[in-house]
Amino acid sequence: MFDTRRVAQLAAAEAARFTADHPGSAAIAPALAAHWLNGVPMHWMRDWGTPFPLVLRAAHGAELTDVDGHRYADFCLGDTGAMFGHSPPAVARAIAAQAARGLTAMLPDERAATVGAGLAQLFGLPFWQMTQTATDANRAALRWARAITRRPKVLVFKGCYHGTVDDVMLRPGGIGAAFDARTSAVEVEFDDPGAVESRLREGDIAALLYEPVMTNMGMVLPQPGLHETLRALTRRHGTLLVVDETHTLSSGVGGETRTRGLEPDVLVCGKAIAGGLPCAVYGFTAQVEAGMQRVLTARGESHGHSGMGTTLAANPLALAALSAALDSLHVPDTYRVMLAGAEQLDAALRALITRRGLDWHVARVGARLEIGCGKPAANATESAAQMQPALEHALHLWLLNRGFLLTPFHNMMLYSPVTAADDAARLVAAIDAFLGELA
């Protein structure tokens, strides 16, 4: 659709512009490279495609400031971790207050009962456990599922992402795997309930772990009736249904589980659940809780030797942040602002695509949006085939140089409750200007 040479030329020009405009980040880069893999504390922080790392100075609301003083309208928001904005005031106050009262203690904080009740009300599941990341929560949920059902395998959808859980690391790119995940997990396409039923019929699947909307290979929306079908199939074949809401919390209060009436046996949520502080939770039904108790009783050992959880999980600092987030962020008023803004951004992006005559689409789940190159895909395989990495790289650099940050992995945008409508309008104008340069 676009001339590949022109895309490469534009990317090169934007890389040169980045270098010229960011002397502060450039000056810090050698010191970073001296002690950090790829010159960053986490190697994927180089996925932005910049000549050297963009170094952060501060993040407030929906805005970032780098060490050179440049400001950015942040539509990445920590890849969902800061979905409600950076350092929401109520959460920041709770963290500051708790920091003086203790960070970790291996004891339930006095707010734990209220927080448990809040989670139950938010998602509709009665029992809960806390972890530090959604990866940890998914790992624990799958281990419990295998222990309860006495079945060895997990079913996932091709192209899924559930953190760095070894059990389901079927996608390419996993480094140093401890074992071949094909011995513990099976994958089928997102749009193939027949394949799901066929695999469940074999009787060795402990859990179906899935995102209500696939978000790892672009954003793939479910076909009508898929959720209901998966719920019916898992019940019929005695398989636990584990719903990962980490990226779909943007759908509305209580995520897809509440907005779509899902009925998971286990629900996992991380990243944004505590307003951006490292924290995750997994909730489960009374039937699952009874199964957990049977497993623990049968073991006849101390619960501390279950091999799940860490001594830092459910620490008072995380619980304080989670408590504040439940009270101030996971409420209708917050989502009303987010959803209205995202709807307007969605309409503006669709109008731009139509005006430019592009065979593209916009996928939206609540406050989360993504631009896809091509028609809406039915599964991850179709979505991956449509991706244009070189074009996306050039677009991201173009936007970064003009004060906009998108998630580097694909064209994901989040509209937070503190995102300015003017920033959204300027973002659309910047994308339009980029397309004009290519045209």
Image: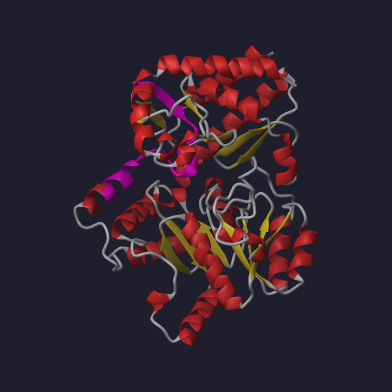
User: Which sits in the foreground, 154 or 360?
Assistant: 154
Q: Quadrant of the C terminus?
A: top right
- Asked whether the viewer can see residue 42, the reply is yes
Q: In this view, does 109 lie above or below 1?
A: below
Q: In the picture provided, is 89 more to the left or to the right than 155?
A: left
User: Which sits in the foreground, 410 or 173?
Assistant: 173
Q: Residue at x 54, y 48 (%)?
A: 247
Q: Quadrant of the N terminus?
A: top right
Q: In which quarter of the image is residue 209?
A: bottom right
Q: Which residue is drawn at 34% across and 65% down?
A: 311
Per the rendered image, the range of residues in magenta is: 69-95
Q: In this view, does 128 lie above or below 16?
A: below
| Horizontal and vertical percent position of residue 196 | 75, 62
User: Which sits in the foreground, 195 or 432?
Assistant: 195
Q: Which residue is drawn at 40% across and 47% down?
A: 275
Q: In the picture provided, is 186 more to the left or to the right than 195?
A: left
Q: Quadrant of residue 334?
A: top left
- Asked whether the viewer can see residue 60, the reply is no
| Horizontal and vertical percent position of residue 73 | 45, 27
Q: In the picture provided, is 119 more to the left or to the right than 13?
A: left
| Horizontal and vertical percent position of residue 419 | 45, 31
Find out whether residue 109 is within the magenta segment.
no
Q: In which quarter of the image is residue 108?
A: bottom left
Q: Residue at x 68, y 44 (%)?
A: 220
| Horizontal and vertical percent position of residue 41 | 39, 40
